[in-house]
């Protein structure tokens, strides 16, 4: 662990490297040194990652009051936005109510209510309308999802705020650092430069599958690579892969061999219990071509799973495109589980803020208007939570009906409700004997003994298999920017068996490319001449 005031530390660690295990160990090592009046903060990028770290820590220690673990938005809200938003150029209302949507969602909602002649028709008019909406929301204390970042950045631009925030934070741990955009990175840098906070970041550049920040023109400028190349951080390499077989780890090294200083990153498959290198296994990496039909691809995958005695609950089928996912779920007879709905977080605060937003009231005004107290507000929020999970509330309209007809509250028009952002499932049990089906973005961070990744087209497949770093790093169109890294994320979920499918027939040239990557065609690829 580095001392406060020294360089930050970046750990480059690939899939299955034990990143969470190691971070938990580092947190436990740091806690005896933590001052009672300062914080150790751990930033994650998903609620499930937050849960995972909390669960692992709580099995080993009693969580102290000054250990914070949460998403980047919850961190920024707690440590910067709530206490320092008065330093924002546009003042924010005294009570902060966090909306589960972005400023664009609010703008579109407002535009829908306008007559055709009053709609914003030029970029200038759109920007002006958004500025008016933003100012009005700020005055009311409403903070949209994207405003959390902009307000936090504006606050941290004030040297006094940056100093106070750094003084509160003795340690700052950043999980999945590759997912940090420039705004978040600049905030982290503002804290680091104060010389008061020990900063420890963990990530894998090849798993960067977020939309490109408009300020990032080259892949080499994503924050994790920019920081690793700077003098402000020391870089450490963790090349272990405790998840995948040797065959799969060797296959992944075709795509992740990036140079860091004098060291080239390449994973070594290791046995978790002993850290000894794994030996080559019988399972191979297979390719299955289709003819615009997912069923034969899935059937071949199932045959291979049976051959290696991998049961249905240990199988995962993933794809990039939502329409491909829909075809997969239909092909498996809807007998599947969706990992994105599994969480133990009860989002009552998020629902409460959404309710107050749609009523256009803060808590004190709500208590006064409805002769209520905090328990009433919580009871309403729990009722909405249950209605969402039971399917009573499916969209914005059914939400409005429920709030008005069941809860007896008066909704004011003008602000949107993003029900999808409030859908959580608090079930902990496995969902029967079912295969996992998910998008690549959803399954990131998870693993499975057997994985089938299905590309929609040969073009998509070729992007997944691109091993040349100069080609992988190119910023293409918005649609294809992250495809090479999406392939890497998909492939690296597999522990024992990896199958790659393509809905369309592929060329002889593509078959040869796969064979050069040691991918075995199964049973016989459908070939066509270029």
Image: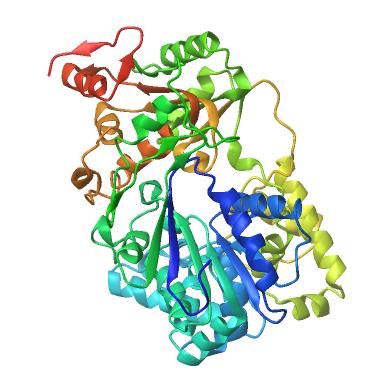
Q: Residue at x 87, y 75 (%)?
A: 371
Q: Residue at x 45, y 82 (%)?
A: 154
Q: Is residue 449 above or below residue 161?
A: above
**Residue 403 x %, y %:** 74, 58
Q: Is residue 173 above or below residue 470?
A: below
Quarter of image, res 71: bottom right
Which of 82 and 309 lies nearest the eye of the viewer?
Answer: 309
Which of 192 and 275 lies nearest the eye of the viewer?
Answer: 275
**Residue 39 x %, y %:** 65, 75
Q: Residue at x 58, y 72 (%)?
A: 171
Kindly tell me whether residue 123 is visible in this rendering.
Answer: yes
Q: Is residue 169 above or below residue 241?
A: below
Relative to residue 82, is residue 228 drawn left or right?
A: left
Which of 445 and 11 lies nearest the eye of the viewer?
Answer: 11
**Residue 335 x %, y %:** 62, 21
The total number of labels drawn is: 0
Name, please, the residue furthest toward the left.
530
Q: Residue at x 77, y 48 (%)?
A: 386
If the image is split into quadrants, where does the C terminus sit?
Answer: top left
**Residue 148 x %, y %:** 52, 72
Quarter of image, res 378: bottom right
Relative to residue 279, is residue 97 drawn left or right?
A: right
User: What kind of colouring is applied to the model shown?
Assistant: rainbow
Which of 232 and 146 lies nearest the eye of the viewer?
Answer: 232
Kindly tell me whether residue 453 is visible in this rendering.
Answer: no
């Amino acid at each position: 662990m580095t001392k406060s005031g020294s360089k930050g530390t970046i750990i480059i660690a690939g899939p299955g490297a034990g990143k969470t295990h190691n971070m938990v160990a580092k947190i436990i090592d740091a806690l005896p040194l933590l001052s009672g009046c300062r914080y150790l903060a751990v930033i994650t990028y998903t609620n499930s990652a937050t849960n995972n770290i909390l669960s692992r820590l709580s099995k080993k220690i009693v969580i102290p009051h000054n250990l914070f673990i949460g998403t980047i938005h919850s961190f920024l809200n707690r440590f910067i936005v709530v206490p320092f938003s008065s330093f924002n150029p546009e003042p924010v209302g005294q009570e902060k109510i966090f909306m589960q949507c972005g400023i664009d969602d609010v703008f579109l909602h407002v535009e829908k209510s306008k007559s055709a002649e009053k709609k914003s028709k030029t970029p200038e008019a759109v920007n002006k309308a958004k500025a008016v909406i933003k100012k009005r929301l700020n005055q009311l204390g409403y903070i949209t999802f994207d405003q959390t970042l902009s307000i936090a950045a504006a606050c941290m631009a004030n040297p006094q705020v940056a100093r106070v925030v750094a003084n509160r934070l003795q340690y700052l741990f950043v999980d999945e650092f590759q997912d940090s955009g420039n705004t978040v990175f600049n905030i982290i840098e503002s804290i680091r430069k104060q010389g008061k906070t020990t900063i420890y970041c963990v990530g894998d550049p090849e798993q960067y599958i977020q939309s490109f920040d408009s300020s990032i023109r080259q892949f080499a400028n994503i924050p994790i690579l920019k920081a690793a190349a700077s003098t402000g951080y020391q870089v450490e390499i963790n090349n272990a892969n405790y998840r995948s077989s040797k065959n799969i780890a060797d296959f992944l090294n075709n795509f992740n061999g990036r140079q860091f200083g004098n060291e080239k990153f390449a994973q070594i498959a290791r046995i978790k219990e002993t850290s000894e290198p794994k030996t080559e296994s019988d399972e191979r990496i297979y390719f299955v071509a289709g003819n615009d039909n997912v069923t034969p691809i899935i059937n071949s995958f199932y045959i291979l799973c049976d051959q290696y005695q991998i049961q249905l609950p240990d199988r995962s089928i993933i794809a990039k495109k939502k329409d491909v996912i829909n075809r997969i779920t239909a092909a498996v007879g809807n007998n599947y589980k969706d990992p994105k709905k599994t969480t133990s977080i009860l989002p009552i605060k998020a629902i409460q803020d959404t309710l107050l937003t749609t009523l256009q009231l803060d808590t004190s005004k709500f208590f006064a208007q409805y002769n209520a107290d905090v328990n009433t507000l919580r009871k309403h929020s729990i009722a909405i939570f249950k209605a969402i999970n039971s399917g009573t509330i499916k969209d914005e309209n059914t939400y409005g009906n429920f709030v008005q007809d069941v809860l007896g509250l008066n909704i004011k028009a003008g602000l949107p409700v993003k029900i999808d952002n409030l859908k959580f499932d608090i079930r902990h049990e496995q969902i029967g004997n079912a295969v996992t089906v998910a998008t690549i973005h959803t399954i990131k961070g998870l693993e499975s003994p057997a994985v089938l990744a299905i590309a929609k087209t040969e073009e998509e497949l070729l992007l997944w298999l691109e091993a040349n770093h100069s080609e992988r790093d190119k910023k293409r169109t918005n649609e294809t920017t992250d495809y090479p890294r999406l392939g890497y994320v998909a492939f690296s979920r597999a522990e024992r068996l990896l199958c790659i499918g393509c809905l369309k027939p592929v060329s002889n040239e593509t078959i040869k490319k796969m064979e050069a990557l040691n991918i075995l065609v199964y049973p016989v690829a459908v070939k066509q001449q270029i």
